[in-house]
Image (tube, helix red, strand yellow):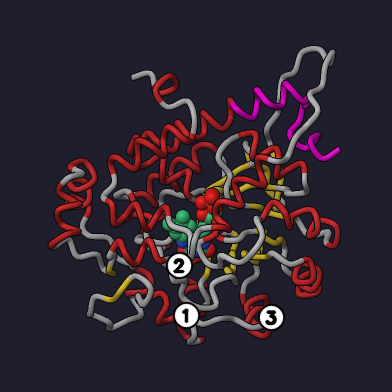
Amino acid sequence: MDYHSKFPAVSDLKKRAQKRIPHFVWEYLDSGTGLEHTRKRNRIKLDEIMFYPSILHGDINPNLKTTILNYEYNLPFGVAPVGMSGLIWPNAEKILAGTAARHNIPYTLSTVASQTPEDLATHIDKNAWFQLYPPRKTEILDDILKRVKDSGFTTLVLTVDVPDASRREKQIRGGLTHPPRLTGRLGLQAISKPVWLANTLKNGIPKMKLMQSYSNERKSLSSTAHIGYLLRTSPDINYLRNLRKKWKGNLVVKGIMRAEDARSLEQEGVNAIWVSNHAGRQFDGTFSSIEVLPKIKEVTKLPIIFDSGIEGGLDILRALSLGADFVMMGGAWHYSLGAMGTKGPNHLIDILTKDLIANMGQLGLQHISDIKT
Ligand SMILES: Cc1cc2nc3c(=O)[nH]c(=O)nc-3n(C[C@H](O)[C@H](O)[C@H](O)COP(=O)(O)O)c2cc1C
């Protein structure tokens, strides 16, 4: 099949994915919180960023290689952490980690993913990052850090924008439980998506395997009271300092929206900050991440990773032009999996690469880092 003519844009993948993923899972993937003002604002404010096209620059042969955290990646974008990725599309973690390794871009495994760090050890390269939702108990924290390191993950990402469970009303209405129970209404939704269902039954009902290994919890819980939430805490500055002492590799803090926070993190020995509003999934009363990016760039010399609302190569250039050093996506990777299964992430990389190159031509950029000058 000619995927490029069938799905030339992320929006095509999204439309197709919605048709192939059960409704209750779709609501988990695609929900913001509240009235989704922040989620919509992410898109609106990205669209408002304009460039002047460049002319008479001769041939352009764009180079997309990008260095961050002392590592050169082939492309300026990567995979953000997504909890229960394997529920959205069976085996998602391994497919995404493997595709990312082959393309030499970063893949981030979530604490609440459906695969463990050990499950991914043979699928990752030096490209793998691990995202930590901070466990309450020191023994669990220490054990997770050891497992993550022993499995070959090089960079630890501490997420700090989930002090409590998000309400995410659409998701609540959708009725997802953890572990998912495919009975009644949800069962009917699952049956109507045969490819998803067949693959899910083949791989087994996904669970938060890492957190489950520390829990005797057997009951099914609502989506916002699951094991991940039960085991983790809302970290304070001492938690971060302690983590910095324990983890010798790269440490990134994810979920930064205020310039003051970025400035104070410089004193804490972190290696990068990740500007994100979690795709508008946590707090409906905040700015788009692209609006706050220049203010954060102004006050810090730390490398900046950026996400929330990215849907194409032009968006990646927009974020890089305002001070990001690297760009991540969560939703788009899962739209690609939902639309095309294992071949999806490869195709998404193709879309984004072609889009970046076309827009770099318009801007006369030979190298991706030239966007900053
Ligand atoms: C379904 C879903 C689950 C997510 N789970 C996590 C998670 O476990 N940990 C985390 O730090 N961020 C999580 N995020 C946020 C992403 O890492 C990322 O910040 C966000 O998706 C970026 O916005 P985008 O989806 O518009 O690209 C999740 C996002 C989605 C869509």
Packing grade of label 1 (10 A; few <14, some 14-19, many >=20) is: many
Predominant secondary structure in magenta?
helix
Q: Residue at x 54, y 56 (%)?
A: 279
Marks 2 and 3 in Cβ contact (< 8 Å): no
Task: Tell which of 129 and 90 is nearer to you.
Answer: 90
User: Where, quadrant-wise, is the C terminus in this rendering?
Assistant: top right
Q: Earlier in the sequence, mark 2 or mark 3?
A: 2
Q: Residue at x 37, y 70 (%)?
A: 210
Q: Could you tell me the amino acid type at mark 2?
A: Thr
Q: Is residue 321 above or below residue 178?
A: above
Q: Which residue is mark 3?
A: 241
User: Where, quadrant-wise, is the N terminus in this rendering?
Assistant: top left
Q: Could you tell me the amino acid type at mark 1?
A: Arg
Q: Position of residue 296 (x, y in %)?
A: 78, 60
Q: Is residue 279 left or right of residue 292?
A: left
Q: Could you tell me the amino acid type at mark 3?
A: Arg
In this rendering, the label closer to the viewer, 1 or 3: 1
Some atom of ligand 1 lies within 8 Å of the CB belonging to the residue at label 3: no
Marks 1 and 2 in Cβ contact (< 8 Å): yes
Q: Earlier in the sequence, mark 1 or mark 3?
A: 1
Some atom of ligand 1 lies within 8 Å of the CB belonging to the residue at label 2: yes
| Stretch of the chain drawn in magenta | 355-373
Q: Which residue is mark 1?
A: 232
Q: Which residue is mark 2?
A: 111
State how far apart marks 1 and 2 are (Cα). Answer: 10 Å
State how far apart marks 1 and 3 are (Cα). Answer: 17 Å
Q: Assess whether residue 199 is covered by the magenta stretch.
A: no
Q: Position of residue 60 (x, y in %)?
A: 75, 18
